[in-house]
Image (cartoon, rainbow, N blue to C red):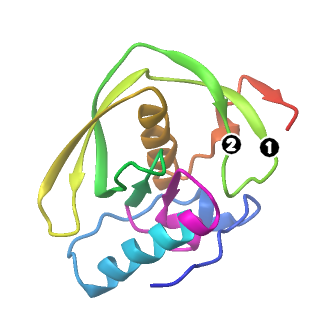
Amino acid sequence: MAVRKVLKDSEPLLRKRSKEVKDINEEIITLLDDMLDTMEDYNGIGLAAPQIGVLKRVIVVKISEEGEAIELINPKIIKSKGQDRDVEGCLSIPGVYGEVTRAKEVIVEGLDREGKKRKIMGSGLLARALQHEIDHLNGVLFTDKVEKFIEG
C-alpha cells in the first residue's frame, strides 16, 4: 500500500474516459489499497483512479472518520431522485470551491474487490461524493458543472 500523487486539473489524463475493469486481479486490489491510502493522506472523502493517473473505472468514497470506506469497480448510477445544490471541492483542484446541483439521492451498482455485485443507496453527502467520483471516470471535473464559484 502506498500514497500516490494526486494529479492536478491541468493534467490532460483527467479529461479522458476511463476503461472498464475486465479482471479483478492483484493490480486492481493494490490500486484500491493505494487509493484508500491516498484519499486518507490528502484528507479527501472520495477519489477516482484517474486522479492518480490510472484510467480504470474504480472509485473509493469515505464520508466520515467512523464510516466504512466504499470501494466500487465499474460503478454505474442506476437510479437518481431529486435535486440538491451544494458546495464542492476536489483534491485535483485545490483551493477551488463551487456550488453544483446534483441528484439528492442515488443508487449506484458496481463490484467490490471480491467481484461481488454491490448496490449502494446514497443520499446527501454520500450521493454527492458518488456522483462527483463517477464524473471523474468520464473525464468530467466538478468545475464543468459549477453554477457559482465560492471564495475558499
First of labels 1, 2 by sequence position: 2
Residue stretch in magenta = 40-57
Residue kind at label 2, given as amino acid type: Gly
Q: Which mark is residue 96?
A: 1
Q: Is residue 17 above or below residue 119?
A: below
Label 1: few (<14), some (14–19) or many (≥20) C-alpha neighbours in 10 Å = some
Distance from label 1 to label 2 (Cα)?
6 Å
Disc 2, SS = loop
Residue that carries the numbered disc 2 in the rendered image: 89
64 falls in the magenta region = no
54 falls in the magenta region = yes
Q: Is residue 17 above or below residue 79?
A: below
Q: Position of residue 103 (x, y in %)?
A: 44, 23
Label 2: few (<14), some (14–19) or many (≥20) C-alpha neighbours in 10 Å = many
Q: Is residue 99 above or below residue 120?
A: above
Question: Is residue 33 shown left or right of residue 39?
Answer: left
Residue at image point 70% right, 39% down: 143
**Is 49 in front, or is 152?**
152
Spot the residue most to the front: 66
Residue kind at label 1, given as amino acid type: Val
Label 2 near label 1: C-beta < 8 Å?
yes
Which quadrant holds residue 89? Answer: top right
Residue at image point 41% right, 58% down: 59
Question: Is residue 27 shown left or right of residue 116?
Answer: right
**Is 133 in front, or is 63?**
63
Q: Quadrant of the C terminus?
A: top right
Q: Quadrant of the N terminus?
A: bottom left
Which quadrant holds residue 43? Answer: bottom right
